[in-house]
Image (tube, rainbow, N blue to C red):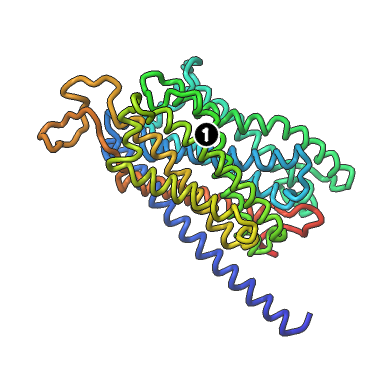
Amino acid sequence: MSAASAEHVGARRAGTSRGLAAWLIVLVAVLAAGVGVWIYQYIRGLQITHMRDNVIWGLYIITFMYLVGLSAGGLIVASSGRLFGVERFKPIVRLAVLEATVAIAMAAVMILPDLGRVDRVLNLFIHPHFLSPMIWDVTVILIYLVLSLTYVWLYTRRDLAARGSWLALGTRDTSEAARARDERTTYRLAWVALPAAVLVHSITAWIFGLQISRGFWYSSIMPPLFVTSALVSGLALVIILALVVRRFERISFDNGLVSYLGGMLAVFVAVEGFLVFCEVLAGYYPGVTTDASRQLFTGRYGPGFLGVEVTAGLIVPFILMAFASLRRRPAIVALASVLALIGIYAHRGNLIVIGLGKAPIQLAPGTPLGTPQASGSDFAMSSVYFPSGYEIVIVAGMFALAALLFTIGVWVLPLKEKGHGAGGLSG
C-alpha cells in the first residue's frame, strides 16, 4: 500500500471513529433523558401521560406492538432464507438475527413504562392467569428472546472463538468440521425460530382479536394482518440497517440483493394493503358502518390513516418497488423502506386509538377523562388521544437504547459470513 493510500485509509478510520463517538454520545444523552422522565413518571404516576379511562393503552403499547413486529419480521426473513436455502440471503442473515434480538429485548422492556406499579411486575409470574392472552404474550416473548440470543451466538461463536473473545463462552474449535456442525444446528433451529416468530406476533394479535367488547378489534383477520405487517416492517428495517452497515464495511453484498429485497418488500406491502382493505370493507360496508370504522376516514384520525398509513406507508412504497429500474437504486429502496416503517407504525397507532376511543358501554355521562371538556364536564362518551411530551421522551429513550445495543452488537460481533470478510468496527 502506498503512503498516500495508507494516509487516506487512516483518515477515513479516524473520521469513522469520531462519527461513532458522536453517535454514541447522542444515544446516551437521549437514553438518559428517557430514563429521567420514566423515573419522574414512576413518582407522579401515569396521570402525566395522556392515557385515561377510555384510552388505557397509548404510545407505549403502540411501540411495544411495533417492536414485536420488527423482531418477528427480521427473524422470519432470516429463518426462511436458512430453511429454504436462499443463498443470496447469507450476507445479511446475522444482521437480521441481531436486529430481531435487539427488537424483542426492547419490546419486553417497553411494557414496563406502561405499568403504573413496575414493582408488581413479578405478580405476572407469581399469580399468572393462563386464560389471559397477555400471559401467553409475556411467556412467548421471553422464550423468543432466549431463542434469538441462542441464534445469534450459534451464528457467531466460531468467529468469536477465532478472535479469542470471551463471548465464545468456552468455544475453541474453529475447524471447518465444527462450522459445519453449527450450520446443521442453525438449520434445525430455524425450524423452531420460524414458527416462533409467527406465533409471537399472532399472540399479540389475539390480545386484540379476542376482545369481543371491542368491535373494531374483534376479528379473525388480526393474526394474519399482524404477521404481514411484521414482514413489511421487519424486512424494511433489515434493508435500511444492511445499507447503513455496508457503508461501514461491516458486511458486504451487491446491489442485486438490494433489488431482490425491494421486490420482496413490494409483495409484502401488497398483501398488507389487501388485508387492510378487507378489514376496512367489513367495518365500512353500507348498512353495517361502525363509528370506529368511520373515524378512519373522518375526524382527527383521518389524516393518520389515509395520509400516513395508506398513502405514505402502502401506496408509495409499492409504486416505488414495483419497477425493476427503481429497485436497482439502493437510495430508492431505502426510501421505500423508511416509508413502509412509518406506515406500519401509523397502523399500530390507528389500531389502538380508534379501538379504545369509544367506551364499550355508552351510558351517560360517559367515562372520566380527567380534563374538562367543551361541555364543561370531565366525562365523555369518547375521547381523542395524542401522546404527551413525557411519553414521547420515554419512547425516544427506548429507541435510543435499541440503537445503542444494535451499535454495540455491530461493533462486537462478526456479522460477515466466512468468505465475505471479517466483522468488527475496528476494521
Please name the residue shown 36% across and 30% down the image.
355
* Residue 320 position in % (x across, y down): 55, 55
Furthest residue toward left: 376
Give the left or right position of residue 383, taking residue 19 as reference: left
Q: Secondary structure at mark 1?
A: helix
Up-down relation of residue 265 to residue 200 (above or below) = below
- Of the pair 246 and 232, the residue shown nearer to us: 232
Q: Residues within 10 Å of mark 1 (few under 14, many from 20)?
A: many
- Residue 291, quarter of picture: top left
Q: Position of residue 365 (x, y in %)?
A: 16, 23
Q: Position of residue 8 (x, y in %)?
A: 67, 79
Which one is nearer the viewer's eye here, 410 or 293?
293
Judged left or right of residue 292, residue 272 is right
Check disc 1 and report the residue beneath it.
Answer: 226
Residue at image location 70% in from the left, 39% down from the top = 79
Residue placed most toward the observer, 297 or 105: 297
